[in-house]
């Protein structure tokens, strides 16, 4: 070693520090890669992503290779630094070399490359694979032996050694990923994706049309009245019952009635033949399940019943799809009938409107995990039927009771623009 020029030793030492930084940064970059983006890039043919995917399939061998290379160059750098110190300062230089080399490796071979790799993992990891993959093949016997000994020690202490290249995401984790996607996914698409994930938390009774609002055809009426209801109805499918809405016998499609009318065959007998068998849905059915049921049964409308078979309401395929994409049909009569905008920025709202519909119409955030209607929500909070003029605040929104009956709240006034962030409900 005495014959080797000092300048050459310094160059070798600098090269070893660079190698140490390379191994340290490569480890951080490869571990920091977004696994889902990596799979996407590999799928579309990105060479660096494919190499990285192959390396990450056996994380134990990859880490073994990186640590083998890192420790080798660090130990060799320490030996060369000791030789340089002995030649420059004698034995007293060993301590100086140890301190300086520790500082240099910490700054230039650990903290700096790892920080850069964590900030820009793809820029660091993909080029590094061109070195690491052939190096792994070259040193495979040594890496394999190290991995075997490591697994043996882990089994000795009963630590699971199964590895997985990618972990599955739960629904909550996927919801977080979607919400944090930022500009990568348009905000409207984010809402749609989150709505799909939320479907398992929403039941059919949360979005159904309640039985008191269901328009149908009573077979006990005169034929002239039935014809009038058929032609005046704004709905394409109507339940048909005898005497009471609780005694539903089927569903009639307006398209079939129109065909009979055009063929001049619209008689009571032909009308009865056009009635389809009703499709009943148990209450508590999640929307994601019911969407699949509609698809399997080739249905677009269902009648929600409780455990005793009593009719509760009506739900359609369009109602479920609107939970995903928002309102995609135009029904101005619904807004005019249930929600009346006022000049002061408030809204007069029918007490029977569903909270979910009201939230969509007015962009509110009223709670949807309890009663289905705004009337039910108010009665639940007050635990009584309020008097007109009563004011309260729910989810921060000021609400004034305008009209009530003996058993329900008929009309309320809501002030969306005066919302205050508060967890406590105020009642006046």
Image (cartoon, grey):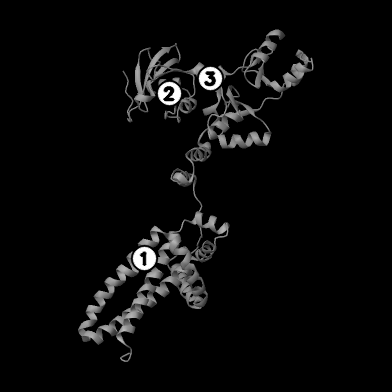
Say which of marks 3 and 2 sits in front. Answer: 3
| In-front residue for pair 418/407 | 418
Mark 2 or 1 closer to N-term? 1
Residue 163, image x, y percentages:
50, 62
Say whether residue 220 is visible.
no
Alpha carbons under labels 2 and 1: distance apart? 57 Å
Label 1, on which residue?
113
Say which of marks 1 and 3 sits in front. Answer: 1
Say which of marks 2 and 1 sits in front. Answer: 1
Q: Marks 1 and 3: CB-CB under 8 Å?
A: no
The N terminus - image quarter: bottom left
| Residue 377 tag number | 2
Residue 66, image x, y percentages:
43, 71
Residue shown at 71%/24% (left/top)? 276
| Residue 24 tag number | none
Alpha carbons under labels 1 and 3: distance apart? 62 Å
Residue 345, image x, y percentages:
39, 20
Residue shown at 40%/63% (left/top)? 28
Residue 144, image x, y percentages:
50, 74
Residue 130 lies left or right of residue 84; in this view the side is right
The C terminus - image quarter: top left
Label 3, on which residue?
334
Residue 53 lies left or right of residue 16; in this view the side is right
The image quadrant of residue 331 is: top right
Element under disc 3? helix
Q: Badge 2 local density, few (<14 within 10 Å), some, or many (20+)?
A: many
Mark 3 or 2 closer to N-term? 3
| In-front residue for pair 237/415 | 415
Mark 1 or 3 closer to N-term? 1
Q: Badge 3 local density, few (<14 within 10 Å), some, or many (20+)?
A: few
Q: Badge 1 local density, few (<14 within 10 Å), some, or many (20+)?
A: many
């Amino acid at each position: 070693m005495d014959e080797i020029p000092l300048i050459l030793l310094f160059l070798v030492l600098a090269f070893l520090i660079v190698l140490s930084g390379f191994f340290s940064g490569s480890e951080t970059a490869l571990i920091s890669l977004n696994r889902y983006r990596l799979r996407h890039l590999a799928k579309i043919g990105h060479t660096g992503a494919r190499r990285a995917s192959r390396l990450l399939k056996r994380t134990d061998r990859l880490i073994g290779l990186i640590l083998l290379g890192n420790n080798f160059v660090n130990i060799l750098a320490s030996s060369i630094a000791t030789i340089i110190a002995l030649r420059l300062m004698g034995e007293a230089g060993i301590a100086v070399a140890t301190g300086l080399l520790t500082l240099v490796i910490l700054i230039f071979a650990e903290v700096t490359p790892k920080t850069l790799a964590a900030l820009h993992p793809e820029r660091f990891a993909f080029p590094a694979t061109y070195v690491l993959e052939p190096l792994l093949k070259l040193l495979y016997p040594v890496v394999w032996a190290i991995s075997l000994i490591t697994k043996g020690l882990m089994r000795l202490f009963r630590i699971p050694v199964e590895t997985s290249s990618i972990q599955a995401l739960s629904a909550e984790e996927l919801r977080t990923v979607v919400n944090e996607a930022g500009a990568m996914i348009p905000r409207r698409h984010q809402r749609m994706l989150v709505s799909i994930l939320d479907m398992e938390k929403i039941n059919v009774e949360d979005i159904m049309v309640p039985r008191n609002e269901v328009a149908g055809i009573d077979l006990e009426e005169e034929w002239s009245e039935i014809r009038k209801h058929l032609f005046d109805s704004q709905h394409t499918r109507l339940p048909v019952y005898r005497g009471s809405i609780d005694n539903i016998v089927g569903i009639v499609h307006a398209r079939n009635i129109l065909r009979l009318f055009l063929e001049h065959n619209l008689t009571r007998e032909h009308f009865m033949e056009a009635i389809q068998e009703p499709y009943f849905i148990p209450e508590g059915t999640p929307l994601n399940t019911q969407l699949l049921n509609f698809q399997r049964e080739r249905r677009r409308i269902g009648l929600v019943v409780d455990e005793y078979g009593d009719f509760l309401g009506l739900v359609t395929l369009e109602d479920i799809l609107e939970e995903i994409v928002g309102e995609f049909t135009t029904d101005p009569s619904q807004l005019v009938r249930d929600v009346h905008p006022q000049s002061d920025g408030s809204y007069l709202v029918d007490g029977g409107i569903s909270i979910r519909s009201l939230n969509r119409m007015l962009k509110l955030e009223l709670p949807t995990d309890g009663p289905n209607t705004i009337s039910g929500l108010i009665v639940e909070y007050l635990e009584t039927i309020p008097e007109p003029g009563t004011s309260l605040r729910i989810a921060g929104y000021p609400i004034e009771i305008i009209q009530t009956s003996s058993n329900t709240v008929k009309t309320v006034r809501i002030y969306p623009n005066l919302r205050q962030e508060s967890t406590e409900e105020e009642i006046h």
